[in-house]
Amino acid sequence: MWCFHNSAAVHLERLFSFVPADYIQKRRRCFCSMPTMKISELFSQEKPVVSFEVFPPKPDSPFETVLEAVEALHVLRPDFISVTYGAGGSTHSKTLELAQHIKNELGIEALAHLTCISSSDEEIEKILDEIADRNLENILALRGDPPKDCHKQINKIHACNLIERIAARKKFFIAAAAYPEGHPEASSQEEDLLHLKEKVDAGAGLLITQIAFDNDYLKRFHEKALQHGINVPITAGIMPVFSASQIKHISGLCGATLPPALQNMMEKYSHNQDALQSAGIEYACRQIDDLVSYGFAGIHIYTMNRPLLARAILTGTNLR
Ligand code: FAD
């Protein structure tokens, strides 16, 4: 079990001066070995579910490199925090260690990502055992992408196969990924929606969308999902713009369209990083308020382990 880093706590109390001084320590004492809770229960509340995505440290970096960010994020009291997974599988224990820390030490429900593209059935079974042993109950089941520098075998497999395997254990709540603009490999959005329905039929009870910067895609996708009989909650993935080059890179990787308003904004503030961040946060806030009014069950903030961005978004929207 991970030990809380006192110097991080002191730093956080300064950063989050609106939080009572002993808040972090008290929360930790209350939530050690928190009972298991399926994320589905959160979606019975009337207000939108707010979740954050974080990533674990790189394989050769110590746990402390992300701890401070995660501690700062938990103070913002998201409903759950998801932890990404390296598709090569080499970082799986860091993903699980961080998810366990978030749940059992910080008292926030955790959603552990898990990919299957380069893991054997036996490896997946072992990881599922480990997830259960760590008192984790919620899994975002993904196929993943072939890792560039991985010499392991790449499986001809889809997320629905992993979902079936996890569902067979009758122990975990399963979430899956959804693509408002269609997955880049799919020949059409229609084909992608049919495969999305397969994931839900296999046992996924929550869909988290890929990053989208244009709400029209998200809304049309929501409508089409309903038309395809997809009735599980859908939470919209939002990433605030913080650096023009990084956002262009990320949108290229995941196939998210950058609408003209966003491109103009990045152009306008191309020489002023602070102004770009402020405008990016404002853009994300307006996106979120619009999506909540539309009826999305939740908002998933891709935090990039940057608590100040997440905090600015919560302050600037009607989410809290
Ligand atoms: P699938 O659902 O298998 O879909 C992949 C493609 O195959 C799609 O084109 C789909 O239409 C098609 N397909 C699906 N089922 C079938 C079928 N039965 N027959 C034929 N075709 C089919 N990657 C990571 O490595 N680590 C992470 O932590 C991570 N987290 C993510 C979180 C979210 C919210 C999202 C949206 C993505 C995340 N990814 C992550 C990226 C993800 O792994 C990639 O987008 C990957 O290419 C697809 O994964 P998937 O689970 O959606 O795959």
Image (cartoon, rainbow, N blue to C red):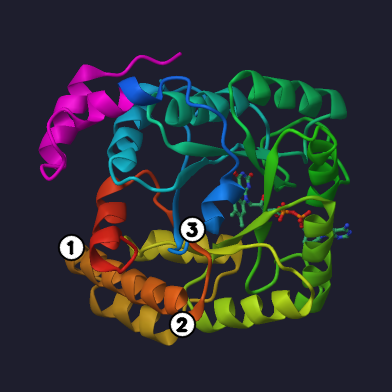
Q: Is mark 3 within 8 Å of ligand 1?
A: no
| Figure quadrant of residue 260 | bottom left
The residue under label 1 is: 274
Residue numbers of the magenta segment: 1-28
Q: Disc number at residue 45? A: 3
Q: Secondary structure at mark 3?
A: loop
Residue 67 placement (x, y as % from top left): 35, 28
Q: 265 or 107: which is nearer to us?
A: 107
* Residue 95 in the image: above or below residue 244: above
Q: Is residue 10 magenta?
A: yes
The residue under label 2 is: 259
Q: Quadrant of ligand 1?
A: bottom right
Q: Residues within 10 Å of mark 3 (few under 14, many from 20)?
A: few
In the image, what residue occupies the spot 18% across and 69% down?
275
| Residue 199 falls left or right of residue 107 | right
Nearer to us: label 3 or label 1: 3
Q: Residues within 10 Å of mark 1 (few under 14, many from 20)?
A: few
In the image, what residue occupies the spot 31% across and 18% down?
4
| Residue 304 falls left or right of residue 121 | left
Q: Is residue 11 magenta?
A: yes
| Label 3 or label 1, whichever comes before in sequence order | 3
* Residue 57 in the image: above or below residue 267: above
Name the kind of residue labelled 3 in the image. Answer: Gln
Residue 213 placement (x, y as % from top left): 47, 73
Q: Is mark 1 within 8 Å of ligand 1?
A: no
